[in-house]
């Protein structure tokens, strides 16, 4: 689950006690449920860099990325059995007014990739 936000808002964010407290409680609930794999909040793009390939060459640009419409403000990585279960947990997220939460599924190489791209067994 990812928290997209406009880049200009990210540059002005000050962690709010109420929201951080609610988010930590949410984190703990997912940890206790045994579904939490990882979670982090992210600094604004002014503290980051972007790498892209242009004309066959690697181009590195320091932030902020004002041309971006949205950037990821933070994420939770959870492991549940279905999209419906992910949505159940997402509905509990303490989002602020206007907040957005995206849900993405992670590729599972052993099942989502064709046989020639699947990892080889260590026992072979």
Image (cartoon, rainbow, N blue to C red):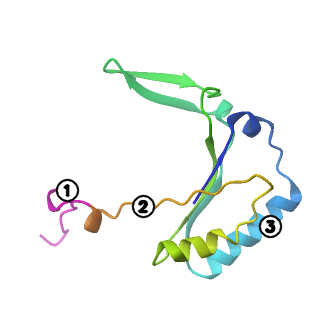
Q: Who's the residue at 60% across and 32% down the image?
A: 68
Q: Position of residue 101 (x, y in %)?
A: 64, 57
Question: Furthest residue to the right?
Answer: 17
Picture quadrant where residue 70 is located? top right
99 left or right of 117 in image: right
Q: Who's the residue at 68% across and 69% down the image?
A: 27
First in residue order: circle 3 vs circle 2: 3
The residue tagged with tag 2: helix, strand or loop?
loop
Question: Furthest residue to the left?
Answer: 124
First in residue order: circle 1 vs circle 3: 3
The residue tagged with tag 1: helix, strand or loop?
helix
Question: Furthest residue to the bottom?
Answer: 33
- Secondary structure of the magenta portion, mostly? loop
Q: Position of residue 88 (x, y in %)?
A: 61, 76
77 left or right of 116 in image: right
Q: Who's the residue at 27% across and 68% down the image?
A: 111
Please provide the residue range marked out in magenta: 113-124
Disc 2 designates what residue?
Answer: 106
Disc 3 designates what residue?
Answer: 22
CA distance separating discs 3 and 2:
26 Å
Disc 1 designates what residue?
Answer: 117
In the image, residue 1 above or below residue 84:
above
- Is 119 magenta? The answer is yes
Q: Who's the residue at 54% across and 77% down the image?
A: 85
55 left or right of 105 in image: left
Q: Residues within 10 Å of mark 2 (few under 14, many from 20)?
A: few
The residue tagged with tag 3: helix, strand or loop?
helix
Q: Position of residue 25 (x, y in %)?
A: 76, 72
């Amino acid at each position: 689950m990812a928290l997209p936000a406009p880049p200009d808002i990210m540059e002005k964010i000050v962690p709010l006690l109420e929201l951080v407290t609610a988010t930590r409680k949410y984190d703990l609930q997912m940890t206790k449920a045994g579904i939490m794999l990882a979670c982090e909040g992210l600094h604004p793009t002014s503290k980051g860099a972007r790498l892209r390939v242009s004309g066959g060459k690697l181009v590195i640009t320091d932030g902020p990325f004002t041309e971006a419409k949205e950037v990821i403000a933070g994420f939770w990585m959870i492991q549940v059995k279905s999209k419906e279960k992910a949505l159940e947990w997402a509905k509990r997220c303490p989002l602020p007014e206007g907040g957005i939460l995206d849900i993405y599924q992670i590729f599972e190489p052993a099942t989502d990739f064709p046989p020639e791209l699947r990892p080889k067994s260590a026992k072979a």
